Amino acid sequence: MINNIECAVVEHQQAAYENVESLVLLLCKECVAGVDKINLPTSLQTAVKAFIAKYPDFYEVEMVHSLGVMYQDKLLQLTVVGCGEGKECTPANFRKAAGAAVRVLQKQKATTAIVAVPLLLNPTRAHYLQAIAEGLYLGSYTFNECKGASKPATLCKLQITSAVENGRAVLAQAEAIAQGVTLTRNLVNRPGNWVNPVVMAEEARKVAESHGLEFEVLDEKDMAAKGMNAILAVGQGSKNPPRMITLKYNGAGDAPYTAFVGKGITFDSGGISIKPGENMGEMKDDMAGAGAVLGAVQAIAQMKMPCNILAVLSCAENMPGGNAQRPGDVVKAANGKTIEVVNTDAEGRMVLADAVWYACEQGATRVIDIATLTGAVIIALGNETSGIITNTDALADAIKDAGKKAGESFWQLPSLPECKEAIKSDVADLLNSAGRAGGCITGGLFIGEFIKEGVEWAHLDIGGTSTATKTSGFKVKGGTGFGAMTLIRYAGTL
């Protein structure tokens, strides 16, 4: 059970429609022909056909229609959700439709429902079944932890009509993925006084102990001994000390490790270069990259995927205390390069500098870092697409493909030599900020300076996608968990 939803698969038989309160029909335009084949009871089939005749544009993605239908001498709630037409009939749109549908069930306070999907008459459509289950689980997400008298949501048992081979195993995968994303969302949504670097370490420890992962936490003394002065400089203004957290999942024996490295700024005031007060509370989400990495490695371990993953969470709190770093300071990172701190609000790249270096030192042959790094990525790509900076185009292509399958959009930005010149300092090796122009690119290229030669690397900037201002599809207002599903899908290609 996730988010008070239980899912099971059943055959397309009339018996499946007995004793349910609600019927959800997920339909693309081309699926209409399949309505006759899913063995709906006659009265329900008549109602569905009358509905289709009345609403010919029903198939628009996420369009929801609900109506009451008399069935077995009682009122049954029928909900039809559109899934597109032609090329729109994708797993991503079925995931969105399922997310929209489950919220209707929540409003109805349904305890039993059947999700009828003609497309799943095809036994090879496992990827659609998984997407639908993910949408149901994630679309039902609510965050009530901070409410003193919140009532638990109604448990809804859902049956999905399907002829997909190994349907139960597909649902188990969807459940594991949804649990990982839910972990990420919960961490992002919790306030800054609930989540700090030490708390992140404890959350990671729970995941490691639950799934038998190797686990390590470096405290301030440990990091100082390793020369990790970049992350220490960011965290020195806070009473909550920084932590470098590592989990290691071995599912592929002696195969090389791929590192997932997450920015974990548990609250970002901007430091001495303090942010404007308006909406500063939203900066509790600046650890969304670390949250995505933790959610991803939990799911990967739960599914026992055949890959080797090194998860690094680089966590600090950026505060303007009396011991905080100052603009103009110069610090030496663990790889020996010096950094001129132009802006203390460009702190994420500094904690990642030591983190990606540490991942390389531990033997990772490929590093993917993920971070709410810049506001510039929002200007460039909006709030639905995340940016990629990389030293390996093939890696960017693989991430984009994984993101497409996960329903998460990425776009590769150019790594221009001129942008690399912009982060050079007159008094140190590097500037921690090159200003507004190309800010997403220069921020990513700064992190790339700490990647060991010969190691494939990609930086994912989720500055515009880590939170949502409204609920839509399988994404719920607040922390989206963006990136976790992409990392999981990418791990499946290793």
Image (cartoon, rainbow, N blue to C red):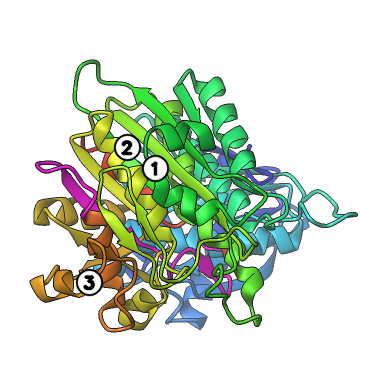
Label 2 crowd (10 A; few <14 / some 14-19 / many >=20): many
Looking at the rendering, in which quadrant would you find the N terminus? top right
Q: Are marks 1 and 2 in contact (CB under 8 Å)?
A: yes
Please give the label number shown on residue 358. Answer: 2
Q: Residue 427 vs residue 392: left or right?
A: right
SS at circle 1: loop
Please give the label number shown on residue 228. Answer: 1
- Given residues 285 and 95, the one toward you in this image is 285
> Is 454 placed above or below 481 here?
above
Label 1 sits on what residue type? Met
Label 3 sits on what residue type? Asp
Q: Position of residue 412 (x, y in %)?
A: 20, 66
Label 2 sits on what residue type? Tyr
Magenta span: chief secondary structure: loop
Q: Residue at x 35, y 70 (%)?
A: 29
Between disc 1 and disc 2, whose residue precedes? 1
Q: Residue at x 9, y 41 (%)?
A: 454
> Is 36 placed above or below 126 here?
below
Give the distance between the C-alpha atoms of the residues marked 3 and 2, in whole angstroms: 27 Å
Please give the label number shown on residue 426. Answer: 3
Q: Which residues are magenta?
A: 449-476
Between disc 1 and disc 3, whose residue precedes? 1
